[in-house]
Image (spheres, rainbow, N blue to C red):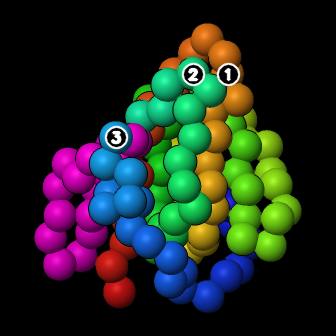
Amino acid sequence: MATAKFPQPTHEDPVKLDSRHYKIEFEDESVRVLRIKYGPGEKSPMHSHPESISVFLTDAHAKFTYPDGRTEEIKANAGTVQHMDAFTHQPENLSSSTPFELIQIELKR
């Protein structure tokens, strides 16, 4: 899931671009912890994340669209912990009836 090697992203910060889905839970000089929530069928504008660790609080079924137009379907079960390299994407919840939620720990370097 979103683990292809990309240079450090330069697109918008999702918290500034889409505060409806992204909330800062904690931030210091080493990490920023985001709570990410998407309702059924919701999507976000293209944005970027630095290298991070995601902890899925619920099951998730999403589609990531990357800047080059490539898409990737993402499925994760509640409790899954996943490392992601820095990347830029447009996420979309593919479920028409189920929201998903995760905690993302962005690493600062």
Q: Secondary structure at mark 3?
A: loop
Who comes first in sequence, dot 2 or dot 3?
A: 3
Q: Which residue is mark 1?
A: 95
Q: Position of residue 46 (x, y in %)?
A: 58, 62
Q: Residues within 10 Å of mark 1 (few under 14, many from 20)?
A: some
Q: Is residue 78 magenta?
A: no
Placement of the N terminus among the 4 image quadrants: bottom right
Q: Secondary structure at mark 1?
A: loop
* Residue 7 drawn above or below residue 36: below
Who comes first in sequence, dot 3 or dot 1?
A: 3
* Residue 61 drawn above or below residue 66: above
Q: Specify whether residue 77 is in view.
A: no
Number of marks in the rendered image:
3
Q: Nearer the viewer, residue 58 or 21?
A: 21
Q: Is residue 24 magenta?
A: yes
Q: Which residue is mark 2?
A: 40
Q: Position of residue 100 (x, y in %)?
A: 51, 27
Q: Nearer the viewer, residue 82 or 74?
A: 74
Q: Position of residue 98 (x, y in %)?
A: 57, 15
Q: Specify whether residue 81 is in view.
A: yes
| Residue bounds of the magenta highlight | 21-36
Q: Amino acid at mark 3?
A: Arg
Q: Amino acid at mark 2?
A: Pro
The Cα–Cα distance between marks 2 and 3, rounded to whole angstroms, is: 14 Å
